[in-house]
């Protein structure tokens, strides 16, 4: 298994006894953008290509699958056009079926998606809308608090009021042009993530308008990272965001894009789509 060295951005070492970290968009005068610093750390990232079939959502926090039907030329044209209505009409039903097949869920509810195309003219950490550049900070989209908020907003009341059923939040990530060489997606094996280095992080707007809660992570040498080398459009990555089931090894999956040291200077800018959904089990 080939291993590469790159740099990822983590939250500074943060005491669990301090106030929660926060990120504030559009801060008004007198309000800080955030109350912590990002720090860059070298990481070793393993090529998972030769063991692609061995990773699982509940053990590692991520998994891969081949999905030829979701990468037909017709479907890719729809996705690259980035027309939200057409994506919801054509792609969402396919992803619902794919997630059911992968997880065994009885119901899948998709609540949004993000399309990205890297803009080389922007700096590595410039991302004015949060939707253009690959996400270079190590994160997981939702904390438990954030996931429950999303659940209440998007899932029938009888489900979010009765969490005796298993409910899983999962992202389905697909490159729109392959093979990916420019800023590939890396995922951390949850089993190597110390829970003391996991920080729920409030998302605020303007002053203290509450927008949700994400998760940030501090660095530790034992954290183990993987990526799928030369990922093609028919190869999908499943990323666990949240799970209300207690007896699983992987509760979530830290992830980020990274600059591959062997990427050609003329590699096409990465394009991808990430669909976010709840998987509900009987």
Image: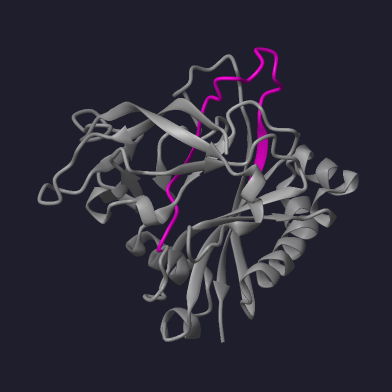
Residue 92's x, y, as percent? 72, 60
Image quarter where the C terminus lies is bottom right
Question: Split into 4 quadrants, where in the image is the N terminus?
Answer: top right
- The residue at the point 35 percent across, 64 percent down is 144
User: Where 44 sits versus 62, above or below?
Assistant: above
Q: Residue 146: tell me if it is visible.
A: yes
The chief SS type of the magenta part is: loop
- The part of the chain drawn in magenta is 251-273
Residue 261 in magenta stretch:
yes
Residue 68 drawn at (x, y percent):
83, 53
Q: Residue 232 appears at what percent x and percent y?
A: 75, 40
In the drawing, does residue 15 fall left or right of residue 266? left
**Residue at position x 89%, y 43% from top?**
73
Q: Is residue 100 above or below residue 276?
A: below
Residue 271 or residue 42, whichever sits in front = 42
Q: Can see residue 206?
A: no
């Amino acid at each position: 298994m080939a291993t590469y060295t790159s740099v990822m951005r983590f939250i500074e070492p943060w005491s669990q006894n301090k106030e929660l970290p926060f990120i504030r968009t559009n801060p008004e005068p007198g309000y800080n953008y955030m109350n912590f610093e990002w720090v860059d750390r070298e990481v070793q990232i393993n090529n998972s290509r030769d063991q692609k079939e061995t990773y699982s959502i509940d053990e590692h926090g991520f998994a891969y699958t081949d999905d030829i039907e979701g990468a037909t030329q017709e479907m890719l044209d729809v996705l690259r056009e980035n027309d939200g209505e057409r994506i919801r009409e054509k792609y969402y039903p396919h992803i619902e079926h794919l997630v059911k097949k992968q997880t065994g869920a009885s119901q899948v509810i998709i609540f949004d998606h993000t399309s990205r195309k890297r803009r080389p003219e922007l700096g590595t950490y410039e991302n004015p809308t949060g939707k253009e550049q690959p996400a270079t900070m190590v994160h997981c989209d939702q904390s438990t608090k954030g996931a429950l908020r999303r659940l209440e907003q998007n899932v029938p009341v009888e489900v979010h009021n009765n969490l005796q059923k298993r409910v899983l939040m999962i992202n389905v990530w697909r490159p729109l042009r392959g093979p990916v060489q420019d800023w590939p997606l890396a995922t951390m094996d949850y089993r190597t993530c110390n829970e003391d280095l996991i920080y729920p992080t409030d998302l605020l707007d303007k002053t203290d308008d509450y927008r949700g809660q994400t998760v940030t992570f501090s660095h530790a040498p034992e954290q183990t990272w993987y990526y799928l080398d030369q990922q093609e459009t028919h190869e999908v990555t499943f990323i666990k965001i949240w799970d209300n089931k207690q007896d699983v090894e992987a509760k979530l999956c830290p992830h980020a894009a990274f600059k591959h040291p062997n990427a050609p200077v003329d590699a096409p800018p990465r394009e991808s789509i990430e669909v976010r959904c709840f998987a509900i089990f009987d």
